[in-house]
Image (cartoon, rainbow, N blue to C red):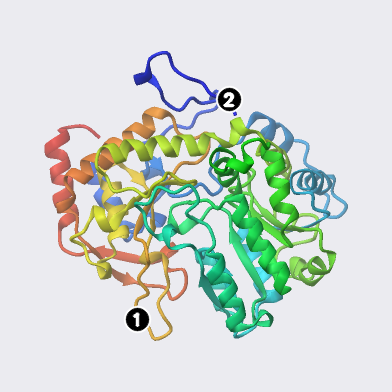
């Protein structure tokens, strides 16, 4: 991996290994308008209109910048319903990256989760994973299964600076399989880059050990590779056994150990869509019939063919260290900047985005008033920055209706690849610092419209008291006529 050092140490910053050739104009509303927009959105950053957002740090899903080669490839798309050459080119790229023979297309990662759950999960089943993702868990529980989270204890400690805090607790995995019986474990899901606990990676060694435990017990190993590219970067830079390996070699070593791999190319491959790959044709045949039923014909699976062409190129580009390092380097810079200001961050910097520990940022807000959601609302007021709540709002209530409080209350500031400039990252850090210095003004939230499933997507909340108006007034007092 290339190293570029600056002559003067104080100038050392992440260096973009690309140039910008297409731009999109941004708009920053006044602080008064931001309060109004937030109220209209029900204090849910998902419901904000993009025209009212200055920096969109909600997610890295489907918002990464494509390369010139991806855009060029999308123009050669073959939109034939059957026998499409676009599909053939994508299968070839997947085989190059993962070494897999079989591919089932789907419109994105959660569609793959639906297919997996429909095929393999029965009432009473248990699916172990290092940590759940919202839609993954929902697909399993709606079919009568349950999720067991087996991430190591270190993964839930935002202060411990360990290289692989997303690792499975292997002894707990073995114990769980023994307790429930392998016949009640349809598969073990390995999430390469834990979304809900700060984008923390797994080591290659840990993933291979999980796959070994699965083989010994006759259980299917399933890799969620949606966030694999960041995880590959961390393996390459943090794991001693991988430092002499190429990204392609690391990928193949992991892929060869897995029974199934699924992914969202809204993350992996800088495109849109997703799919399931395997070398086990029997497993593919079990799932195959659900693709036309839920997604589309087997040559496109609900994807738009231009996106499939871009995906094929993007997957191959993922094997380039200078391409996949851009996200983690910018995230690390933002985490270090905020940490130097005293802002409580999840450390070390992981993939996907920088994660603020809302519990410590807003210690005066109790769990039942959703500190991570309140922090997301407050940051939009402070700077027109749209982050994503990754805490209790992102959970779902227990069957008895009681609240299921998250183990971590985080505000995620996603850093889509090749999208933001360094000055925009520094603007984000500046506004977070101002908000931290005025954190006593921030209050809680309460539900006014709470969906039963995936409430964080389209539920609506309101501020408890007039804290948002007071925060806006303090902004105006400190910044004058500045946006």
Most foreground residue, 191 or 273: 191
Residue wearing tag 1: 402
Q: Position of residue 180 (x, y in %)?
A: 60, 83
Residue 5 position (above or below residue 328) = above
Q: Which mark is residue 2?
A: 2
* Secondary structure category for the residue under label 2: loop
Can residue 115 be seen by looking at this rendering?
A: no
Of residues 240 and 67, which is closer to you in this image?
240
Give the position of the N terminus as an image quadrant: top right
Q: Quadrant of residue 398?
A: bottom left
Instruction: Say if 215 sits above or below 398 in the image.
Output: above
In the picture, which quadrant includes the C terminus? top left
Query: Percent x, y for residue 468?
Result: 19, 54
Instruction: Please give left or right for residue 180 compared with residue 334 in the image.
Output: right
How far from the left and from the top, in percent, is residue 40? 31, 57
Q: Is residue 357 above or below residue 460?
A: above
């Amino acid at each position: 991996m290339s190293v570029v050092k600056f002559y003067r140490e104080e100038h050392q910053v992440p260096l973009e290994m690309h140039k910008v050739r297409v731009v999109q104009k941004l708009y920053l509303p006044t602080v008064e308008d931001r309060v109004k927009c937030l109220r209209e959105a029900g204090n849910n950053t998902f419901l904000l209109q993009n025209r009212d957002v200055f920096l969109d740090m909600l997610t890295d899903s489907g918002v990464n910048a494509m390369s010139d080669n991806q855009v060029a490839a999308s123009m050669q798309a073959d939109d034939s319903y059957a026998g499409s050459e676009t599909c053939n080119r994508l299968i070839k790229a997947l085989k190059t990256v993962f070494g897999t023979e079989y591919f089932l297309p789907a419109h994105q990662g959660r569609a793959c989760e639906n297919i997996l759950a429909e095929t393999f999960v029965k009432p009473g089943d248990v699916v172990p994973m290092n940590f759940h993702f919202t839609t993954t868990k929902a697909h399993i529980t709606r079919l009568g299964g349950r999720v067991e989270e087996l991430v190591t204890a270190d993964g839930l400690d935002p202060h411990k600076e360990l290289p692989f805090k997303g690792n499975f607790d292997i002894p707990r995995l073995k114990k769980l399989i023994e307790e429930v019986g392998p016949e009640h474990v349809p598969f073990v899901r390995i999430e390469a880059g834990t979304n809900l606990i700060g984008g923390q990676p797994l080591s290659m060694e840990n993933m291979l050990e999980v796959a070994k435990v699965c083989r010994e017990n006759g259980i299917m190993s399933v890799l969620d590779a949606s966030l694999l590219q960041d995880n590959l970067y961390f393996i390459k830079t943090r794991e001693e056994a991988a430092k002499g390996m190429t990204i392609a070699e690391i990928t193949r070593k992991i892929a060869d150990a897995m029974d199934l791999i699924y992914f969202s190319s809204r993350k992996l491959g800088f495109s849109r869509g997703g799919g399931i790959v395997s070398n086990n044709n029997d497993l593919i045949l079990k799932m195959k019939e659900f693709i036309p039923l839920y997604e589309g014909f087997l040559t496109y699976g609900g994807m738009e063919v231009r996106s499939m062409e871009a995906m094929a190129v993007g997957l191959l580009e993922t094997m380039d260290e200078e391409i996949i390092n851009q996200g983690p380097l910018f995230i690390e810079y933002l985490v270090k900047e905020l940490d130097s200001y005293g802002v409580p961050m999840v450390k070390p910097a992981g993939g996907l985005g920088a994660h603020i520990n809302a519990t410590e940022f807003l210690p005066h807000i109790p769990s039942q008033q959703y500190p991570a959601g309140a922090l997301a609302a407050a940051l939009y007021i402070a700077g027109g920055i749209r982050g994503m709540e990754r805490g209790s709002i992102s959970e779902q209530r227990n069957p008895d209706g009681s609240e299921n409080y998250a183990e971590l209350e985080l505000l995620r500031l996603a850093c889509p690849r090749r999208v933001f400039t360094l000055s925009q990252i520094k603007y984000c850090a500046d506004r977070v610092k101002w908000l931290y210095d005025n954190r006593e003004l921030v209050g809680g939230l309460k539900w006014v419209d709470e969906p039963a499933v995936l409430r964080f997507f389209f539920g609506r909340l309101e501020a408890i008291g007039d804290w948002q108006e007071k925060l806006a007034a303090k902004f105006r007092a400190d910044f004058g006529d500045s946006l």
